[in-house]
Image (spheres, helix red, strand yellow):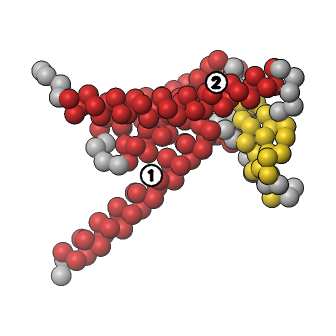
Amino acid sequence: MKISKTVIKNKLINLFIILLIFFLDRFSKIYLLHLYESGIETNFYIYSFLNISLVWNTGIGFGLFSSDANFVYHSITAFIGLINLIIVYMVYIIPDVRKYFLLMILGGSFGNFFDRIYYYAVPDFIDFHLGNFHWFIFNIADIFICIGVICLIFVELFVKINNKGKNEKSNF
């Protein structure tokens, strides 16, 4: 069985997207952790609505389900690993644009998954706020995960609405 150049090219593009997101996330975290370890203040304002504030997240996205209990932490980590495997499978069976949104989610998820294993927590540091109201602190990986999820939802809604319109037209 011969694998075509197009298939190899597509797999390399997929891998490139995942690695690009993973390394963007890793670079940002390593840079901030280097500042922290050098004794440089890692809590500073960039704009009136945005600051950098290093926190360690033992939960899932945006600090949900944070726990110091080993069993809970390892269970969540194993579940995230399983979800990653499912997403890898979905990337290979979905031929359309949704694949790229899954790749964004996967690249971000791999970044956070690596941190969960290596640091036993995920360093989050981007803090958006309006006055005293602060949104959850997050990182670059979380940005890509959220964009991928939002785009998937948008595509699913758009395709369903579009298909519904086509089905109604064909009934007349």
How far is the residue under mark 1 from the one under mark 2?
Answer: 25 Å
Q: Amino acid at mark 1?
A: Leu
Residue 126 visible (yes or no)? yes
Quadrant where the image shows the N terminus: top left
Residue 47, position as x, y percentages in the image: 79, 52
Residue at x 35% of width, y 63% of height: 160
- In this orientation, which residue lies closer to the viewer: 83 or 123? 123
Say whether marks 1 and 2 touch (CB < 8 Å): no
Give neighbour class at mark 1: few <14, some 14-19, many 20+ (Cα, 10 Å): some
* Residue highlighted by disc 1: 152
Instruction: Name the image quarter holding residue 86.
Output: top left
- In this orientation, which residue lies closer to the viewer: 145 or 47? 47
- In this orientation, which residue lies closer to the viewer: 120 or 53? 53
Residue 135, position as x, y percentages in the image: 75, 51
- Tag 2 secondary structure: helix
Q: Amino acid at mark 2?
A: Asp
* Residue highlighted by disc 2: 115
User: Of callouts 1 and 2, which one flags the residue occurring earlier in the amino acid sequence?
Assistant: 2
Quadrant where the image shows the C terminus: bottom left
- Tag 1 secondary structure: helix
Position of residue 109 in the picture relative to residue 73 (left or right):
left
Residue 9, position as x, y percentages in the image: 28, 31
Instruction: Name the image quarter holding residue 25.
Output: top right
